[in-house]
Amino acid sequence: MIPSPIKSLLGLMTIFLVTNCGVEAGNPDSTEEKPAKFSLKLTDTPVTGLSHFYIDAISIKVGANPSITFDQVTTIDVLTLNNGKTLSILDEKEITAGAISEITLTLADTTEPVRAVSSAGVNQKVIVLKDEKATTSLTFTGDLTLTADQAVTAIVDVDLRYTLATLDANSRSKYGVADDVIYALNHKHTFFTEGSRGTMSFTGKQNGELICVTTYDKYTAANLPKTCIPDGADIVKGVYADSNGTATVISIPTGQYNVWGIIGDQVTQYGSRTVASDTEASAD
């Protein structure tokens, strides 16, 4: 039988051990997981016939984390983000660490949250399509893992040459939209971790020359589609050289590619380039 004074002492020891089995706040050995620091940027590939392409956004949701509401409606002119330019949407925002496969950008409740302006300065209506129906958000899909207390930056490639389509009368009827809606923007776009893809830069080209990047040994000058519209497979990217004769293609997956120059019906092959992650593509 344990004497009463010893019982009391054991009781105090038990209380002390239970209440101190956790780690004191601020202890560097704390088991509480710290948040990750997440940044998000947008970029685009320039298109012809448009001078502006505006997106009004009000909030963004990263994976299963709570939505982040902007202080005010954020208007993005996607066409300013070409030739390697980017725009930061989030800057080292603290969110829960873990795997991220989807990011949702919610459009603002404005009269025309997505709209285009032609090269002639004419406003043109745009709808965002998901499963052939109008939607009020853009979906960015990819694959990255956020690590506690580490900074990660993702880039969304809007790539209007691939995701924007001109509507005809049949398409408007199919989607049930008004006759004055000119374009349909696919809701789905791709994000990737900054530094995981390569870049191609070109100089000495003609103003307006279309630089086309394709799968290696897939096309010849005779059968290359001269519109060079990315198809998610063999036509990888198409960008136009600016007035200085320069063009930059970003977010190219690692691999070997052929490069072409297109002016009207004239096609010039510029050889091949090999892309490694986070590097300028080397000429082969």
Image: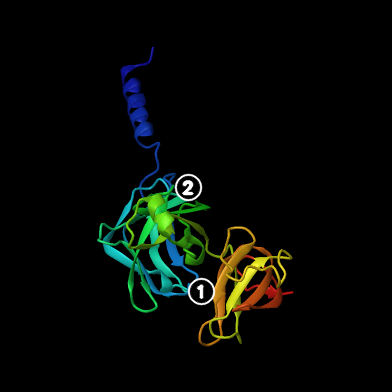
Mark 1 Cα-neighbour bin, 10 Å: few <14, some 14–19, many ≥20 = some
Instruction: Give, as a three-letter code, the residue at label 2.
Output: Gly
97 left or right, relative to 126: right
Figure check: 68 above or below 218 = above
Residue 154 shows up from this direction: no
Whole-percent x, y for residue 177 in the image: 34, 54
Amino acid type indicated by mark 1? Gly
Q: How is the image coloured?
A: rainbow
Q: Quadrant of residue 203?
A: bottom right
- For the residues marked 1 and 2, what is the alpha-carbon distance in whole angstroms? 28 Å
For image coordinates 37% across by 45% down, the residue present is 24
Percent across and percent down for residue 110 are: 25, 60
Q: Quadrant of the C terminus?
A: bottom right
Query: From this viewpoint, is residue 225 visible?
Result: yes
| Residue located beneath label 2 in the image | 98
Of 216 and 58, nearer the camera is: 216
Say which of 80 and 214 sits in front.
214
Name which quarter of the figure residue 226 lies in: bottom right
Residue at figure coordinates x 46%, y 52% from the top left: 148
Q: Quadrant of the N terminus?
A: top left
Q: Which residue is mark 1?
A: 84
Q: Are marks 1 and 2 in contact (CB under 8 Å)?
A: no
Q: Quick one: which residue is furthest to the front in this view?
A: 169
Q: Mark 1 falls on what kind of element?
A: loop
Q: Is residue 230 above or below residue 172?
A: below
Image coordinates for residue 204, horizontal then vertical, percent: 61, 87
First in residue order: circle 1 vs circle 2: 1
Q: Secondary structure at mark 2?
A: strand
Q: Position of residue 235 (x, y in %)?
A: 62, 64
Residue drawn at (33%, 74%) of the image: 122
